Amino acid sequence: MGADRQRWDPECYGRWAAYVPELGRDLVGLLDPRSGERVLDLGCGDGTLTAHMAACGCSVLGVDRDAGFVKATRQRGLSALQADARHLVGPKLPAGSFDAVFSNAMLHWVPEAADVIGNVRRLLRDGGRFVGELGGAGNIAVVRQALHQALHDRGINAALRDPWFFPTADAYHRLLKAHGFQVTEIRLFPRPIPLPGHLSRWMDTFAATFLDGLDQATRQAVVAQVSQTTAPQLCSPDGVWTVDYVRLRFRAVKLG
Ligand code: BEZ
């Protein structure tokens, strides 16, 4: 499973992907964290948004599967725990102990969405909020298709390396409802994002599972092919790459 093999480097992330938490700031607005509330930041990354929520006066715990991200969040003086969203159990995460669970740009890395939503439900008190944003149906379709094609051309099964889960709004709504949530808001919308560098940097940061284990020459050829074939759609004449992101944003409340 590709998602398990995705690795993060907090330094590279800060350099090439700072727009991810930046664009998540208004999602914190949708959460509307109140002073004294207990909030879990699921997939806290480098802790940028965890810090933003803490500054609102709530008590936030960051959770991430990646040890480097947990360390980076702790270095900001915040509480963080290394845990996998599919297995959020243990004495540090008691059932019903959070007023809200927040998640930005992480849920699409975990195809076992039903397990994650079930765990979120268990952690929330009755009436608690689950607010999140993930890649939705059609997200990064141009790059994804080009990655699949470039691997296919070399006899490599890209489906086995593809870590992403990009649901439709209807499918995610059904999942939330089936797990005892009332969905108060859910919408899918395009959000093309200009990158701070070349698409190859984006691939190094986010598409490593497609490239892992390939010899250097094959890796370079795949990156070159993907860049070449997507350039007409994604690269402007002055060399700015814009990736075709599609967001799925939701707010749901745990029914008692
Ligand atoms: C995103 O939608 O945030 C995303 C999805 C896959 C790779 C990188 C980013």
Image: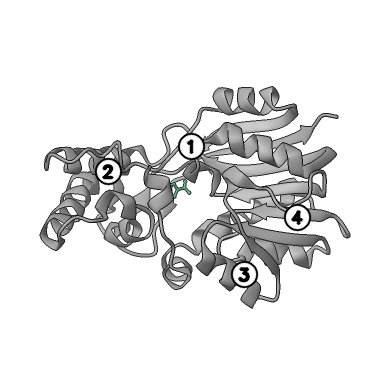
Q: Nearer the viewer, mark 4 or mark 1?
A: 4
Tell me: 96 left or right of 104. right
The residue shown at (75%, 61%) is 60
Residue 137 position (above or below residue 9): above
Nearest to N terminus: mark 2 or mark 3: 3
Q: Nearer the viewer, mark 4 or mark 2?
A: 4
Circle 4 residue: 91
The percent position of residue 211, horizontal first and vertical second, equals 25, 53
The percent position of residue 48, horizontal first and vertical second, equals 61, 66
Nearest to N terminus: mark 4 or mark 2: 4
Alpha-carbon span between mark 4 and mark 2 = 49 Å
Secondary structure under badge 3?
Answer: helix
Q: Quadrant of the C terminus?
A: top right
- Cβ–Cβ below 8 Å for labels 4 and 1? no
Q: Which mark is residue 111?
A: 1
Alpha-carbon span between mark 1 and mark 3 = 25 Å
Q: Tell me if mark 2 has few (under 14), some (14-19) or many (20+) residues whose alpha carbon lies within 10 angstroms of its own.
A: few
Tell me: 141 left or right of 190. left
Q: Nearer the viewer, residue 32 or 238?
A: 32
Nearest to N terminus: mark 2 or mark 1: 1
Q: Nearer the viewer, residue 130 or 28?
A: 130
Circle 3 residue: 73
Q: Nearer the viewer, residue 148 or 64?
A: 64
Q: For the residue marked with disc 3, what is the amino acid?
A: Thr
Alpha-carbon span between mark 2 and mark 1 = 28 Å
Circle 2 residue: 233
